[in-house]
Amino acid sequence: ASNAKFFVGGNWKCNGSVASVRTLVDELNSGSVPSGVEVVCAPPFIYIDYVMQHLDKDKYQLSAQNCWISGNGAYTGEVSAEQLHDFGVPWVILGHSERRSLCGESNATVAKKTAHALAAGLGVIACVGETLDQRNSGSMFQVLDGQMQALVDEVKDWSKVVIAYEPVWAIGTGVVATPEQAQEVHAYLRQFCQSKLGFGVTDTLRIIYGGSVNDANCKELALMEDIDGFLVGGASLKGSSFVTICNAAG
Ligand code: PEP
């Protein structure tokens, strides 16, 4: 990991029930998390209120998994960044590959959402990553450049942005990137940011890895120089596994 504060996000996706969320919150509350690690849990919108009331705030912060591209208004079914901020939710995940592929969110859309959420006072976990086809055909860096440049074009203040590198082929597949594969891309992304934004910004910018991270593979990934944390899907639904991942950098 670099000098930046280690950051772990749990993306619960569209999973859970009243009963399972209660169990997960209890498991998380009974785990211990190092004080030097920033941990964020992202439940589905409908459970945020319960989680906010019951999750130990000394260890965990809350995140949403998405928000609307602009403020309140006639946008049926959406939740705005302003509403999240008003409700006391400090973070939002934007540009997750599932939203890019299933909901058609483009690089420009993700970047505009990011800028809007930041302006509304939220921190943003902005996701980038290539598909297996793109990696195999040699267009990986071009794809990452496009995703990153869109963010660079829109974001003015990077202090509340966390970049999540999530190779699409590793998400939910059980095929984790090797530490070397992840490190290569993280170093590339840091270099990209350094050249566009300068060293001051990049010094504290967290670049976290996501894609089949679990309690068994997290430690060797956390040793890599440019991996500043994780975004965890499946393993974030099991309290003990997630807590182990939160302790990976220790
Ligand atoms: C994710 O969806 O952000 C993710 C990394 O999922 P998983 O850990 O299940 O691969």
Image: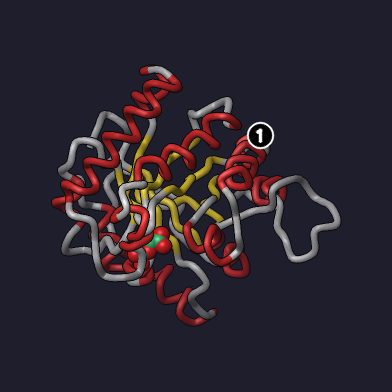
Within 10 Å of disc 1 (Cα), the crowding (few <14, some 14-19, many 20+) is some
Kindly identify the residue that appears in the image at 41 percent across and 76 percent down: 23
Note whether 72 is above or below 45 in the view shown. Answer: above
Whether residue 51 is visible, yes or no, is no
Residue sitting nearer the eye, 87 or 197:
197
Judged from the image, the secondary structure of the residue bearing numbered disc 1 is: helix
Q: Position of residue 238 (x, y in %)?
A: 33, 71
Q: Quadrant of ligand 1?
A: bottom left
Check disc 1 and give the amino acid type: Ala
Quarter assignment of residue 217: bottom left
Note whether 201 is above or below 53 in the view shown. Answer: above
Note whether 189 is above or below 7 in the view shown. Answer: above
Q: Position of residue 131 (x, y in %)?
A: 38, 58
Q: Position of residue 65 (x, y in %)?
A: 54, 58
> Which colour style is shown?
secondary structure
Whether residue 234 is visible, yes or no, is yes
Kindly identify the residue that appears in the image at 51 percent across and 64 percent down: 43
Q: Which residue is mark 1?
A: 119
Assign the N terminus to one quadrant of the image: top left
Quarter assignment of residue 78: bottom right
Q: Is residue 83 left or right of residue 191?
A: right
